[in-house]
Amino acid sequence: MTDSVATQPALPSRQLLEGAARAPARAMLRAAGIDDEAMAKPMVAIVNSWSTVTPCNMHLRELADHARA
């Protein structure tokens, strides 16, 4: 069962794109190749602390790549 758009809670990423004041942000994303269909989807950032400095973080880059795929 899927919720209709009217019954879905507002996504935090909507604040980034909705309203006249966010027109510059939408224009930048369109210039980067993001179409309206992609902008309608939730935006998720994948952030990690990958580094070659400490061995405990060496695997995080590969994990982030898998999450992004």
Image (cartoon, rainbow, N blue to C red):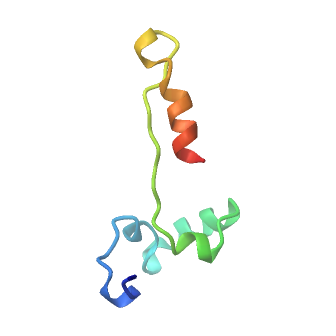
Which residue sits at x=48%, y=27%?
A: 60
19 lies left or right of 62: left
> The N terminus lies in which quarter of the figure?
bottom left
The spot of residue 69 in percent (x, y) is 60, 47
Residue depicted at x 43% and y 77%: 18
Considering only vertical position in the picture, is 26 above or below 8?
above
Q: Is residue 20 above or below residue 11?
A: below
* Count of numbered marks: 0
Measured as percent of width and height from the top left, residue 37 is found at 61, 76
Compared with 30, 60 (above or below) is: above
**Image coords of residue 5 (percent x, y):** 40, 86
Instruction: Check the image and report above or below for 32 versus 9.
Output: above
At 56% from the left edge and 30% from the top edge, which residue is drawn?
62
Q: Is residue 46 left or right of residue 36?
A: left
Q: Quadrant of residue 26?
A: bottom right
Direction from residue 16 to residue 29 in the image, left or right: right
Say which residue appears at 65% left-offset and 65% top-offset: 34
Q: Position of residue 43 (x, y in %)?
A: 47, 61
